[in-house]
Image: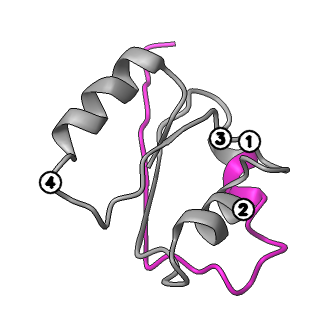
Amino acid sequence: MAEADAEKMQTLRFNYRNLPDVALVHTAVTAQGESSIYNLAATYGGGRGIDVLSIDVDGLDYHLLSSLKGHPDLKPAWFLFASCFSY
């Protein structure tokens, strides 16, 4: 699980403290580079892949999802997206 906000990250660490199989990473997810979904999964996934991919990033959803096209070995079984129609 990746979170850019330090305060929210602190809450996540507390909430997931008894779940050692959940990787918590304090970073902003990017479409490419070190903090891409693919690289985060490779680094912290323990070789297991991703069962559920949930994206809630206000505007970058498409770019993050599109970044997986070049990585056919990363195939989440489920995708969850947050949406807001109040714009």
Q: Nearer the viewer, residue 42 or 67?
A: 42
**On residue 29, which mark appears?**
3
- How far apart, in angstroms, are the residues tagged by discs 4 and 2? 25 Å
Secondary element type, mark 3: loop
Check contact, mark 3 vs mark 1: CB within 8 A: yes
First along the sequence among labels 1 and 2: 1
Looking at the rendered image, the disc whose residue lies closer to the viewer, 3 or 4, is 4
Provide the secondary structure element on which disc 2 rests.
Answer: helix
Q: Residue at x 44, y 49 (%)?
A: 1
Tell me, yes or no, whether the highlighted magenta stretch contains residue 34.
no
Report the Cα–Cα distance between label 4 and label 1.
28 Å
Mark 4 highlights which residue?
Answer: 18
Specify the amino acid type for callout 3.
Val
Query: In which quadrant of the rendered view does residue 65 lie?
Result: bottom right
Q: Dot 4: within a 10 Å radius of its alpha carbon, few (fewer than 14), some, or many (20 or more) residues?
A: few
Q: Earlier in the sequence, mark 4 or mark 1?
A: 4
Mark 3 to mark 4 CA distance (whole Å): 24 Å
Q: Amino acid at mark 4?
A: Asn
Mark 2 / mark 3, whichever is N-terminal:
3
- What residue is shown at x 44% (from left), y 79% (from top)? 77
Checking the image for residue 39, the label placed there is 2
Give the prevailing secondary structure in the magenta stretch.
loop
In which quarter of the view is residue 28 placed?
A: top right
Measure the alpha-carbon separation of dots 3 and 1: 4 Å
Give the magenta part as a residue range. 63-87
- Looking at marks 4 and 2 on the same chain, the residue that comes earlier in the sequence is marked by 4
Q: CA distance from mark 1 to mark 2?
A: 10 Å
**Labels 4, 2: front one:** 4
Q: Which residue is mark 1?
A: 30
